[in-house]
Amino acid sequence: MSDETGSQTDSLGTRLITFGKKYWITAIAFLVFSIMNVILLFRYNWLFGGQDLQFHLQRIDEMTHNLLGGNLNPYLATFNLNQLGSAVMSLYPKLPLYLFAAIRLIVGNPITSFYLGMILTTFLCLWISYAVPNSVRKTDTLGAYIFAIAYALSGLNVTYNFLMADIGISFTIIVLPLVFAGYYHWITAGKYKMLAVGMTLVCLSHVLNIIVI
């Protein structure tokens, strides 16, 4: 039993090393693009007035306080939103909040943590947008790279990230390539796991987009 566990650990370690050697340049490039996407606003050290910014900042702060208190799944807003016990934490999906709240717990500064969250979400969007086309057309690496940059740094993404500041829709945009590629794999090969994961993440990020999809 111990030998099997050891071999599995070695296999995982070998895969991680191989992955790092193969994609380290791509990872650095995506990190640079992610920082460039945010740095022009981050350097002012204040938050611009997005349409839903105040609403989501209060939800992030609410989640942060609840995590500090050991409540991993709050149903009512008792620290923010006028401290009236609003059910907003139950009515809106909370998946995006965990990422921003976790960064807030580590960094402390709410402005810095918000922009770091945006950098990380852009980085995730780039990786998913790069990996998904590769699952459909394995030989077209350049096409996947171009699609990732064009999609993750598109005007649509910038609009939802900063002009509207709607982190729920922003998270949905991140996983949309996963949904469409998953649908392709389902109808062509009967493989449904990618589609199931993508739709689940959409549902946990922004419920209304389930209807649109």
Image (spheres, grey):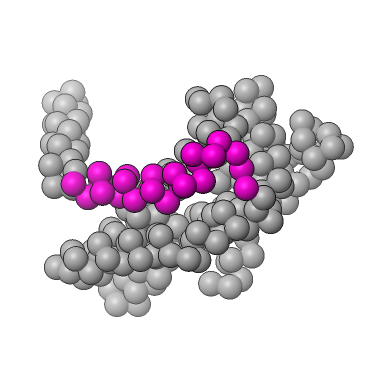
The one nearer the camera, 163 or 118, is: 163
Residue 46's x, y, as percent?
Answer: 60, 39
Q: Residue at x 60, y 58 (%)?
A: 163
Q: Residue at x 54, y 54 (%)?
A: 161
In magenta segment, residue 125: no
Magenta extent: 25-48
Q: Is residue 58 visible?
A: yes
Q: Residue at x 45, y 57 (%)?
A: 174
Residue 76's x, y, as percent?
Answer: 77, 38
Q: Residue furthest right?
A: 84
Residue 32's x, y, as percent?
Answer: 31, 46
Residue 7's x, y, as percent?
Answer: 13, 31
When the figure is inspected, residue 202 is found, relative to residue 116, above or below; the finding is below
Q: Residue at x 27, y 66 (%)?
A: 146
In magenta segment, residue 46: yes
When the figure is inspected, residue 26 is found, relative to residue 149, above or below; the finding is above
The answer to whether 14 appears left or right of 105 in the picture is: left
Quarter occupied by the N terminus: top left
Q: Is residue 205 visible?
A: no
Secondary structure that dominates the magenta span: helix
Indicate the quadrant where residue 31 lies.
top left
Indicate the quadrant where residue 186 lies.
bottom left
When the figure is inspected, residue 45 is found, relative to residue 175, above or below; the finding is above
Instruction: Give the number of callouts.
Output: 0
The answer to whether 132 appears left or right of 20 in the picture is: right
Q: Residue furthest bottom?
A: 188
